[in-house]
Image (cartoon, helix red, strand yellow):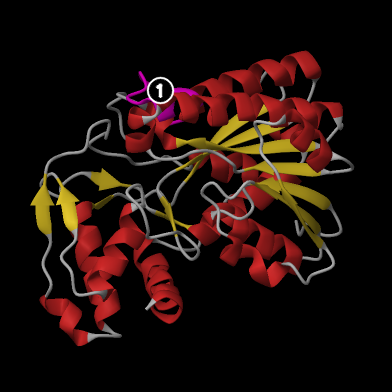
Amino acid sequence: MKLENSKILITGGAGFIGSNLCEKLLKNNNHVICLDNFLTGSRKNIEKFLSNGKFSLIEGNICNIKDCNKAVKGVDYVLHQAALGSVPRSIIDPILTTDINISGFVNILSASIGANVKRFVYAASSSTYGDHVGLPKVEEKIGNPLSPYAITKYVNEMFAQNFSKIYDIEIIGLRYFNVFGKNQSPDGAYAAVIPKFMIQLMNHKSPIINGDGNYSRDFTYIENVVQANILAMTTDSSKLYSSCKVNHQVFNVAYGQRTTLNELFYILRKSLSKFDSKILNINPIYGDNREGDIPHSLASIEKAKKFLKYAPLFNVKSGIEMACEWYWKNLK
């Protein structure tokens, strides 16, 4: 179903995932409101939308309930992407992570309830699986969280489950697995591995791989995530909630394919060498394992396929080829 002529709030709309959602929904002729305080989001990501009459920017904070109430006014759907990500950052500053990811979540969800939004879709996280060793990861089986960040994302799910029952609001959580693609920042100590490796290779530097490179992840191209969010807004309620006692469901959003960090490095190196052959001569440096990291992650996407009709179109290789082209064109 193509969503159009709806009013949609995207929290964290100037961030990596949020800005890609803004772009897609505006192309589909929707009214988009972006709420962002630019703590981690970038004005550059939304510059091209500012002249669009169907785009509105509210510079505000989800930790401020007044900003939340202002942003949800008259809104049909909420896509809650705002959060303070990064496992290492949450270990260094658990207080700020908790304030934003839990208090901010409750604020925007409460404001959405007060505004009678049709459905609230939020960014959950694969970190919720914690120390559960089973692969692939299925939504009903989780372990103990391994970081403050993971705890905050699990608490979000508990609030969503509880509020959906108490306040009768439709809510969907999307557990993202290692999303990558255009607009993802390569800068800073907490940059995600793919853009960080890309920029290092583009600058003829050797990326540092944590551990021996055999840790694996279900890397997920951004277009797959955009598809999942739109499906989460548009799928008929009777197909979503009939199997549970509350109006809340959680779905894995991934490609369903595991890639080691070593494999990732060689895919990136080959893809970027199309623009600069010297990159083929660069080799990685191996460092220590990172605290709070799980060894392996692989998603089962069967539930999303069944209920949302989710059908990811981009595997890690095709996604990286598109991402490399964008980074080379925009950041070289």
Q: Is residue 149 magenta?
A: yes
Magenta part mainly helix, strand or loop? loop
Q: Is residue 278 magenta?
A: no
Q: Nearer the viewer, residue 225 or 104?
A: 104
Image: 99 above or below 194 = above
Query: Position of 199 compared to 286: left or right?
Result: right
Task: Say which quarter of the image contains residue 74.
Answer: top right
Q: Residue at x 35, y 18 (%)?
A: 144
Query: Position of 266 compared to 179: left or right?
Result: left
How far across and how far down the image is residue 86, in percent? 39, 40
Q: Residue at x 54, y 26 (%)?
A: 99
Image: 115 above or below 332 = above
Q: Nearer the viewer, residue 47 or 164?
A: 47
How far across and how far down the image is residue 269, in percent? 22, 72
Q: Which residue is mark 1?
A: 142
Residue at the far right: name it: 74
Q: Nearer the viewer, residue 322 or 298?
A: 322
How far across and how far down the image is residue 26, in percent? 75, 64
Element at badge 1? loop
Image: 275 above or below 204 = below
Residue count near mark 1 (Cα–Cα under 10 Å), binned few <14, some 14–19, many ≥20:
some
Task: Tell me if I can see residue 232 in this picture.
Answer: yes
The type of residue carrying mark 1 is Ile
Region rendered in magenta: 136-152
Task: Tell me if I can see residue 312 in this picture.
Answer: no
Which quadrant holds the N terminus? bottom right
Query: Position of 238 compared to 269: left or right?
Result: right
Query: Position of 6 compared to 153: left or right?
Result: right
Task: Say which quarter of the image contains residue 170.
Answer: top right
How far across and how far down the image is residue 328, in percent? 38, 78
Q: Residue at x 25, y 85 (%)?
A: 276
